[in-house]
Image (cartoon, rainbow, N blue to C red):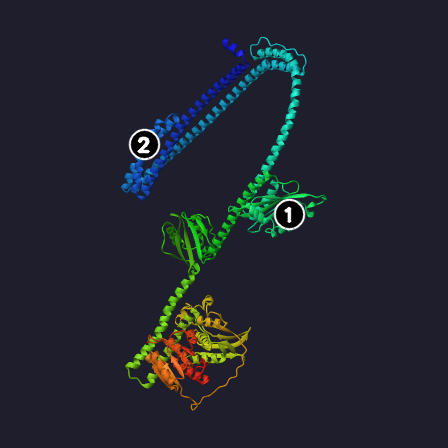
Amino acid sequence: MKINSYIRKSISRQFMALICFFILLFILGGLVLVFLQDSVNNEFVDNRKELVEKQATVREIETKLNSAMFNIRGYFAYNNENLKESALSQQADIRKLINELDKMVISEEDIRFSTELSSFYHFYFDEAMPEAIAYFESGDKDAVASIANNGATDRINTFQQLQTSYLQSVSKSLTDEVSKLTSHIAMLQVAFLVYIMIVLAIVLLLGRMMVRRIGKPLTDFALTANEVAKGNEAEITLVKNREDELATLSIAFEQMYVSIQEKEQDLLAQNEELQAQQDELQAQQFELEKVLETVQLNEDALMRRNRFINGLSSSLDKQEVLERIIVNMCDVVRADRGIIIEVESSAFAAYGISNEGAEQFTRHLYTGMFHRLELEKSPFTIVRDLHLSEKGYHLETGRVHDLYVPILAASGDISAIMMLSRFACGFTELEMEEFIALAKQIGISLDKIHLFEQTEKDRILNRDILNNVQEGIQLVSTKGDIIHANSKFYEIMSDKGELEILGGQKWQEWTGQLRENLEDTDALIAYIKQSMEDSQTDSFIYKLREDKIVKVYSEHLYRGDEKFGTVFVYRDITMEYEVDKMKSEFVSTVSHELRTPLASILGFTELIINRDLKPERQKKYLNTIYGETKRLTSLINDFLDVQRMEAGKQTYEKKYIELLPILERVVENQEVNITKHQINIHNSQKNRFILGDRSKVEQAFTNIINNAIKYSPDGGNIDISIYQEAGYLKVAVKDQGLGIPETALDKLFTKFYRIDNSDRRKIGGTGLGLAIVKEIMLAHEGDITINSVYGNGSTFIMSFPSVEWNMETSTKDVSADEKVRYKVMVVEDDYSLAELIIQELQESDFHVFYSKNGIEGLKKMEEVQPDALVLDIMLEDNKMDGWDIMKAMKNSENMKNIPIVVSTALDEKEKGIALGANDYLVKPYPPSQLSRSILQTLLKMGKIGQVLIPEEQE
């Protein structure tokens, strides 16, 4: 009773009691359902476990029996003892499994199978198998077959069928258990559903009862409250016989109604008072609106300033920042127009000003207010009348206020000038202070841009410097990441396609690209790794495909004592490598070319000295020595020519000369030594003159024709054509020789270069001839080109600038009776060479005087007064050399007009000519050249004047 009374006093307790009842009901039903379902599941699990174990045991017995039977049959078939032992070993396992199965016997079928299994086991392992093995081992195979045929096989088959049937029965039992479990679960589900429906019906009935008990009184209260709210009279019905909240609510509602009526009069009085307060609030609202307007204006000003600051910091482009500054500045200060100009670069931006006005301000910047701004360095204003162009449609006089604001750099100098104009009103002192602060912000921004531009300029300069050096440069961090690499690095290392190694790439990325684009990069990457870890003093040579050779060396970079990276320099040394290779080949070739004639000279000289030879044999040997000496002289001259050309010391004595006689003489000299070749000259030009050095042109023709002969080992025709084309006199030399591979054409005129083919190795040469020809042609403002097909001969075309020249030739034959015996002074410290020169000059009918040193020679020339002097420069007498003799002669009235022919091994022709030499012969040279030079000089000059270098050589 006490509990019932406690619940009746509260609606919430009544609902809680109802909810607890339903919860308890659900819990009880759930527990019953869980218990029943658990019981069914446990029964199913136990039964299934027994059946599964029984099935597994039977299957294992089946497997082992089959294994034993197969093994024993294999033993009978192959007489394999291992199979027999395997079959016998199965017996104990099967016996153990039969014992386990006996423990699982439950049904009659299980007992029947177990009995049959034990009987079969006894039959097979205790009777049939031992008996068959005994017969088989005794050799009686027929008895073994008899055992099988007399019932053993049938007994085995019958047991296997029984075993299969039993396994099927066990499987069926498992299936029945599953079906039984499914049936029980379905029944439980139906029971639970019925239980739920009963509970819901009870909930429905109890709910309806509670709604009627609580809802009706609440509805009555709602209707009464509506009437009271409308101001109508209402009757309040008190709830009796209840102890809950509704009874309390009905009493309180009645008291409230009475209280409302009492206070209604008080509210009317208060309403009048509130009306008066409302009027006062409206007045305060008007004041607040004014304050809000002021706040909004300040907020707009702050927004404009914010845009102004963002315009300064959002870009580093000078022109863009200037445009943002002037637009935002006009917005901030309420200016109608304005302009800003940077002093150093004259860059400007304008707002509300025409292009003509902006250009005018820029042109007259330093003639306007600049000097005042520079002096005061503070903003100031100027008030002036409106110009006609500024009035628009206004006819009355107006005023404009111009504000000049200096923008100061960090150094204190004016970096920019800003001018702003207002038409409505002037600028206050407070605004002027604000402008100074804004100008400082602008100055900081322009300083930042200037610093950025300078940094960017320096960066571009450094990049251009790095990109224009001839070495690839790569800067790598301590972790192996690329910090920077120049364009030459990509050019050198691009071996297979384009290599895109960009700054900032990680070690794995750029080394991976190297491995993809290059071949055999392991050694290179290993060197880079080692260089990053330790300071490498040695360089690394890396060979790319297509014979590109790269030399890599490295150096660590430090900031103070801390290493921050390693710089790698990649140098393309392909050209140097090829030059070294050519020099090596050249040394090998020259060694052969020098030793061959020297060996002949030494050998034949030794024969002449040590043996008594017939005159004709001696003459033959001497001719051979003479030929080898000329060959050796030609080789040495080639070396000296190349050296002079490289040093830029080669001199050319250009005259108007005719090509055809030179070609004919060269061909005549070559035809002496050929038997397989036919040289033909085809001339279609009447004017065959050029401006050139006869000896050098002859040397060029000799080299080209000699090459045509050498590289035509099988003989054939050599056709030389002279023709005019495009203002050039051209000489084409065509042979039918080996031809030149296309890959060698671009290197053909490189010094020391020889084509490395097996068919050319047996042909001698130094690789200098064509290089000399190229230099000679370029010195004559001409060129040499080649057309060749490998295996079908070559055509060398030599182009000379053609000239118009009319020459009247006259020959003066000097008979033996008209010859004059001239006196020649020879100053030479080498006695053997002096004897050769004296012999040659005496045979040419000169009267020769000889002196070994300079001082003695000068004394003799004072006494004898020779017609010419043959002078060696390098004399043994350290007191006076050939240069000193020439200077002394030019200072002497008696000897300054004596022609001087220099005969020396020192190749300084320009110096000799400058000191007064009339001819300059470099040893070795044919002795006859000396006598011809002296004779023609004396005949033409009459002993006085300059010496001419001989134009004809016999």
Q: Where is residue 508 in the image (x, y as percent from the top left)?
A: 43, 48
The residue lying toward the viewer, choosing from 388 and 2, is 388
> Which one is earlier in the sequence, the residue at label 1 or at label 2?
2
Q: What residue type is labelled 2?
A: Arg
Residue 625 occupies quadrant: bottom left
The residue lying toward the viewer, choosing from 772 and 121, is 772
Residue 686 occupies quadrant: bottom right
Residue contact between numbered discs 1 and 2, judged by CB atoms under 8 Å: no
Residue placed furthest toward the left? 138
User: Can residue 439 be seen by looking at this rendering?
Assistant: yes
Circle nearer the viewer, 1 or 2: 1
The residue lying toward the viewer, choosing from 326 and 740, is 326
**Does 65 sit left or right of 418 as displayed?**
left
Q: What residue type is labelled 1?
A: Ile
Residue 353's label in the rendered image is 1
Residue 310's label in the rendered image is none
Q: Name the residue under label 2.
A: 95
**Does 203 sit left or right of 139 as displayed?**
right
